[in-house]
Image: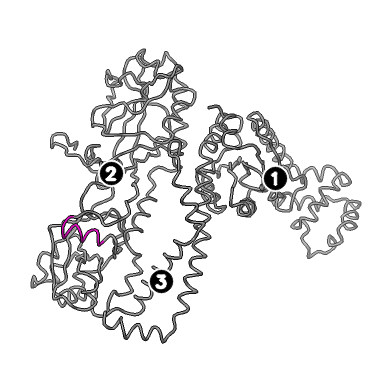
């Protein structure tokens, strides 16, 4: 689909270009670095009289006229009445910057109109014009000085305009001639409150290149789902506030006398502290109030129709945001540990206990037994028994702490805590359902008091119940929410098959930044892996392939090369590359691209940890594909095979050391 058709299909018709070049009068901040001292020193008597007449404060020696917008505007409008050499020197830098930016925005307007868009242009006074714009192209710095004040102005004005039309926020393309565009983009996006897929950047020098078309295509393709996500996040934001207000209103109805009765008639018998109980109650009340928010539910229903075929790649490879969210769904914040689960017990249902490094010395008598040899222990004695002091011994489930990588993020059956923060580090835990330990309450209290054991985290009740069920009867999950997929950084190399049938490195510099491997599961619970590249990597790979000619490659892959050109490769890898069960040291075809007659041509081949000969020797596993990808493990003592990453058995002689 052409960009013109894609824009029309996505309902993108009107664009607004926002740049201070359209402000025909400079401000004081625009000339902050101007040669004001020279300007004032070179004023003629006539110039001085004119400025005093038009701006009476000019006669006040304590006044700094150059810091006032009104004075700068006056000098600008009356400049023809002043000595020419003087005002030309004052405004020279400003005029040069404006002239350069004017060329950029003129080219931008022409391009947008070529693609069928109606274009409006505004300076700093643009907020009202955003109300009916489908696309806003805005300068990173609204001010010639390009300082922090100009950056804040651009953010705050757009934030106000976007908030005013939260029901249908515009797509935003951030542009700049500054080298700080890349480093500032995340702050800008988050400050304005934009969804990642509805926000892109472009350097002004790239406006007349294919980069502009590529970025607009990305915005347009995902516009419908971007709108759904924007609405959901807005409703979530406002709904949380309403729910919290209502929850607090209800909690305020609890009188001190009510708490006294609850304590005497319930908590004293249960052995549960009042403060801990009230926080538990508020948790559930707040959750209920969130569930009754119509806006959140309606927006979430719309998200059920989320289309995944053309979702955009991430900006940064190797992000662990999803693992961070998973950890929050499985465990409470460590601060919650300050609230005890009961009056009579130092531990609560779901507490994680870690033996200290010197636990065996502390436990010189060996009364703790094998407990001191475990990585981590989970308290699985029912909460009510702990509170009432009804059990002589505390039941503990032993587990092994594992690092978070592709080989440990699994969805198959087994007792696992996918992600939990222990002593500040995000790790996973594999639980041994057949390894139970028990300890008397007195011994446990002594171990905690001496430092032989310490409480480091508390898992959420639903997750502990799931693990408890596996311990009791391996009955499977108890309504537990599925873990999000995880992301793990990998190294990526790209090659092409040159005329001699040997592999040559593709010059795509951004591949050195690393890529990311998503690990999830299929409908049978088997591991499923997908290699995802960043936007820059997709663009750089496409550019590198486009630069190749038929003479550069083997005659066996010329059809493959032609099929990958002209944006086809970028579109094919946009949503990621399915790795399937790629076997180490053997290349497998991944995906396909349609040629000019609609016939499927393999996208390329991929392998894990494949050694590419340095001597340019024959390379015979390319299967007629021009593109050759090699995925390598990042910062690993031993290369982990894709079979291991997928949770499959690997013979000892296939493990690469």
The residue labelled by disc 1 is 20
Magenta region: 464-474
Does 400 appear above or below 22? below
Residue 149 visible in rendering? no
Does 439 appear above or below 630? below
Mark 1 Cα shell of 10 Å, populated few (<14), some (14-19), many (≥20): many
**Is there a contact, CB below 8 Å, between mark 1 and mark 3?**
no
Residue 426 in which image quadrant = bottom left
Disc 3 to disc 2, C-alpha distance: 37 Å
Residue 406 tag number: 2
Q: Main secondary structure of the magenta part?
A: helix
Question: Which element carries disc 2, helix, strand or loop?
Answer: loop
Where does the image place residue 636, in percent across and percent down from the top left?
26, 43
Mark 3 Cα shell of 10 Å, populated few (<14), some (14-19), many (≥20): some
Residue 422 in which image quadrant = bottom left
Residue 282 tag number: 3
Where does the image place residue 50, in percent across and percent down from the top left?
90, 53
């Amino acid at each position: 689909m052409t960009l013109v058709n894609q824009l029309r299909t996505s309902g993108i018709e009107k664009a607004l270009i926002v740049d201070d070049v359209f402000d025909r009068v400079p401000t004081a901040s625009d000339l902050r670095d101007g040669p004001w001292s020279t300007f004032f020193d070179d004023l003629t008597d006539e110039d001085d009289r004119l400025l005093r007449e038009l701006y009476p404060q000019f006669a006040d020696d304590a006044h700094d006229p150059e810091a006032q917008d009104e004075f700068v505007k006056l000098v600008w409008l009356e400049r023809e009445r002043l000595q020419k050499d003087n005002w030309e020197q004052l405004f020279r830098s400003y005029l040069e910057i404006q002239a350069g930016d004017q060329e950029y925005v003129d080219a931008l307007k022409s391009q947008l109109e070529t693609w069928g868009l109606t274009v409006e242009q505004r300076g700093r006074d643009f907020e009202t014009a955003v109300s009916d714009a489908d696309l806003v192209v805005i300068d990173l710095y609204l001010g010639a000085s390009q300082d922090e004040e100009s950056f804040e102005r651009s953010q705050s004005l757009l934030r106000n305009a976007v908030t005013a039309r939260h029901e249908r926020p515009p797509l935003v393309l951030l542009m700049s001639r500054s080298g700080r565009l890349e480093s500032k983009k995340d702050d800008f996006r988050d400050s304005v409150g934009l969804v990642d897929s509805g926000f892109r950047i472009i350097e002004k020098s790239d406006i007349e290149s294919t980069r502009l078309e590529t970025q607009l295509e990305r915005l347009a393709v995902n516009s419908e789902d971007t709108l759904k996500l924007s609405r959901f996040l807005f409703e979530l934001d406002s709904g949380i506030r309403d729910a919290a207000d209502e929850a607090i209103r209800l909690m305020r109805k609890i009188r001190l006398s009510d708490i006294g009765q609850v304590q005497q008639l319930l908590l004293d018998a249960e052995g549960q502290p009042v403060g801990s109980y009230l926080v538990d109650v508020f948790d559930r009340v707040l959750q209920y109030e969130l569930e009754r928010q119509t806006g959140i539910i309606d927006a979430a229903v719309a998200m059920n129709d989320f289309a995944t075929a053309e979702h955009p790649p991430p900006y940064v490879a190797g992000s662990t945001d999803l693992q961070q969210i998973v950890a929050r769904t499985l465990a409470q914040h460590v601060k919650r540990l300050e609230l005890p689960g009961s009056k009579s017990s130092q531990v609560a249902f779901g507490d994680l206990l870690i033996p200290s490094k010197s636990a065996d010395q502390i436990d010189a008598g060996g009364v703790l037994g094998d407990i001191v040899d475990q990585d981590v222990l989970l308290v699985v004695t029912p909460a009510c028994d702990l509170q009432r002091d009804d059990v002589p011994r505390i039941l503990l489930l032993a587990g092994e702490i594992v690092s978070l990588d592709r080989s440990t993020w699994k969805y198959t059956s087994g007792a696992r805590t996918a992600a939990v923060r222990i002593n500040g580090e995000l790790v996973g835990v594999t639980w041994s359902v057949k390894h139970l330990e028990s300890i008397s309450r007195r011994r446990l209290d002594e171990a905690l008091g001496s430092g032989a054991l310490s409480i480091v985290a508390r898992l959420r009740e639903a997750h502990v119940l799931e693990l408890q069920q596996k311990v009791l009867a391996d009955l499977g999950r108890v309504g537990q929410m599925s873990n999000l997929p995880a992301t793990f950084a990998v190294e990526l190399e790209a090659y092409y098959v040159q005329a001699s049938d040997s592999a040559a490195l593709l010059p795509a510099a951004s591949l050195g930044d690393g890529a990311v491997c998503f690990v999830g599961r299929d409908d049978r619970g088997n591991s499923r892996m997908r290699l995802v590249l960043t936007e820059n990597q997709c663009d750089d790979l496409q550019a590198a392939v486009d630069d190749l000619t038929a003479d550069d490659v083997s005659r066996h892959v010329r059809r493959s090369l032609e099929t990958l050109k002209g944006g086809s490769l970028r579109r094919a890898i946009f949503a990621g590359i399915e790795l399937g069960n790629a076997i180490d040291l053997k290349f497998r075809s991944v995906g396909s691209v349609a040629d000019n007659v609609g016939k499927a041509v393999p996208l390329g081949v991929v392998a894990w940890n494949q050694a590419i000969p340095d001597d340019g020797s024959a390379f015979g596993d390319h299967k007629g594909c021009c593109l050759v990808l090699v995925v390598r493990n990042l910062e690993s003592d031993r290369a982990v095979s894709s079979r291991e990453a997928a949770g499959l058995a690997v013979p000892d002689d296939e493990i690469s050391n």
